[in-house]
Image (cartoon, rainbow, N blue to C red):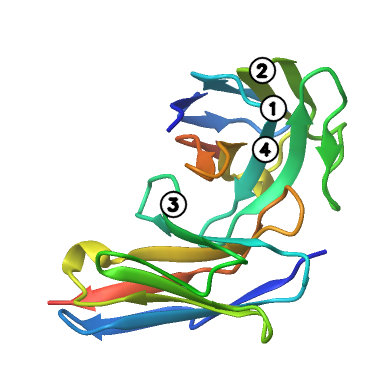
Amino acid sequence: SAVISQKPSRDICQRGTSLTIQCQVDSQVTMMFWYRQQPGQSLTLIATANQGSEATYESGFVIDKFPISRPNLTFSTLTVSNMSPEDSSIYLCSVDEGSRYGYTFGSGTRLTVV
Amino acid sequence: GENVEQHPSTLSVQEGDSAVIKCTYSDSASNYFPWYKQELGKRPQLIIDIRSNVGEKKDQRIAVTLNKTAKHFSLHITETQPEDSAVYFCAALPDYKLSFGAGTTVTVRA
């Protein structure tokens, strides 16, 4: 299956600042997904990122807070803007590898906002 | 949108016993049902999946069953081992976006 790398793996940030998370895949994929996993909770989809078009955001998530870039078929970034302690979560990217491997997740970024 | 409910939220079993986790979904268009295992501090890993044209699928000690009429699917782990301790998530796919259940924390007691 695809190898999905995320950077950074973890970070501690001051409130009011922004953090950009990178997701790199070792193969070309059409759709990439960004999830948030709050402590002890399930995975919540933030947005779907397609190359060459605006990301599609889920209810409760807005582009001003979570801008996403998708410059090519192997890379995407998620920015968490104007952070508050409530943004402390694990952020995961995911790709659809089709019928053989299903949906695969990156290694995740553990964000703590202080 | 799709709503996936998962039960129980926690499950403690004796090593060697079986574990069963159940999920229900709401959208009849869902046609793909994966199960993920997430160990502490790690990413979710796909352990088994089933598509809507199949009623049961088995892979060694794990199996998944699907009842499309009742809109529910289940994960069965037999002969549980300590390394099966983890959080398990079910999910359903009605279009291209996975909807996840709330998760089940499985603890296997030695």
Mark 2 and mark 1 in contact? Answer it, CB < 8 Å. yes
Q: Amino acid at mark 1?
A: Thr
Mark 3 and mark 1 in contact? Answer it, CB < 8 Å. no
- Residue at image coords 35%, 73%: B106
- Residue at image coords 17%, 70%: B81
How far, Cα to Cα, is label 1 from label 4? 10 Å
How far, Cα to Cα, is label 2 from label 3? 23 Å
Please give left or right for residue A24 compared with residue A60 in the image: left
Q: Provide the secondary structure element on which disc 2 rests.
A: loop
Q: Quadrant of residue B61?
A: bottom left
Q: Residue B26 in the image: x percent, y percent?
A: 75, 75
Residue B44 can be seen in this image:
yes
Q: In the rendered view, tell whether residue A26 sits above or below residue B51.
A: above
Q: State which quarter of the image contains the N terminus of chain A.
A: top left
- The front one of B18 and B59 is B59
Q: Residue A97 in the image: x percent, y percent?
A: 55, 36
Please give left or right for residue B16 compared with residue A47 in the image: left
Q: Which residue is mark 2?
A: A73
Q: In the rendered view, tell whether residue A47 sits above or below residue B66.
A: above
Q: Which residue is mark 3?
A: B46
Mark 3 and mark 4 in contact? Answer it, CB < 8 Å. no
Q: Chain of mark 1?
A: A
Q: Amino acid at mark 3?
A: Leu
Q: Point out the tag, 4 or 2, that comes first from the N-terminus.
A: 4
Residue B36 can be seen in this image:
no
Q: Chain of mark 3?
A: B
Disc 1 or disc 4, which is closer to the eye?
Answer: 1
Q: Which residue is mark 1?
A: A30
Disc 4 or disc 2, which is closer to the eye?
Answer: 2
